[in-house]
Amino acid sequence: MNSQPSPRTQVRRLPDRGRYDEETIHGILDAAFLCHVSFVVDGQPFTIPTLFGRKRNCLYLHGSSASRTMRELQKGIPACVVVTLVDGLVLARSAFHHSINYRSVVAFGTARLVEDPEAKMAALETVSENVIPGRWAEVRAPAPVELKATAVIEFTIEEASAKVRNGPPKDDEEDYALPVWAGVLPLRTVTGEPRDDGRVVDGVAMPASVERYQKR
């Protein structure tokens, strides 16, 4: 991955928020499990949300072998993957200066179809482990017919940039005298109480992966 910004990765609006180092970019990707993939087919742009997993400089995506997204991406067309994490609402004294604290990545590259069965299974494990670590070892592995019905795409990141905003609101100096509360309302994703599906075999306890995830 190129760590120097190019015309398509250069952050132009508020450039001081731009980050181009692998440590920041990979850290944001690894803190998320949902991305949005954008591509163009016959002049029509599409953006599709999907789960993903990262290994080194590649992102693994999966879906039905019959899906348009999988069919198009495996052709090697240019694509863009975006991940966004929202960390807080930034509440200023003026409506104009309200904002959010966030971490985002925009990655450009091309994709290829993973066809080798072992590599395909490993990629699916990467996605699963990114969503909930440890779960893959607790469940039945995909059967051959299921593996055949699933397409796995390896998206190689050619270029990427991150954009990060943190800290308090930045009001106009004259507005600091206004009798208006201002600050940051932090946001985070939390887990609720796990609920079984009503058909768990008697004596089966909550798995370690769920317990660990709930305590994070």
Image (cartoon, helix red, strand yellow):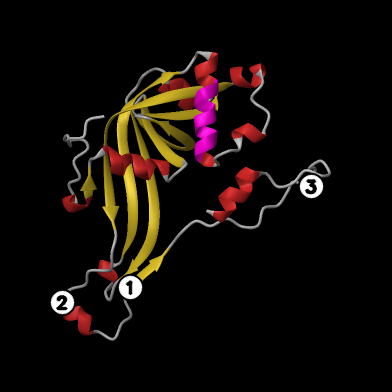
Q: CA distance from mark 3 to mark 1?
A: 44 Å
Q: Position of residue 125 (x, y in %)?
A: 54, 29
Residue appearing at x 80%, y 43% in the figure: 199
Residue 173's label in the rendered image is 2
Q: Label 2's element?
A: helix
> Closest to the observer: 40 or 65?
65
- Considering every residue shown, the one lying at the far right of the view is 202
Residue 183's label in the rendered image is 1
Say which of marks 1 and 2 sits in front: 1
Residue 122 on the magenta span: yes
The kind of residue tagged 3 is Gly
- Residue 91: quadrant of the picture: bottom left
The residue beneath circle 3 is 198
Label 2, residues with CA under 10 Å away: few <14, some 14-19, many ≥20: few
Residue appearing at x 30%, y 31% in the figure: 108
Where's the N terminus, which quadrant?
Answer: top left
The residue range painted magenta reads: 121-130
The kind of residue tagged 2 is Glu
Mark sitting earlier along the chain (1/2): 2
Q: Label 3's element?
A: loop
Q: Position of residue 137 (x, y in %)?
A: 62, 32
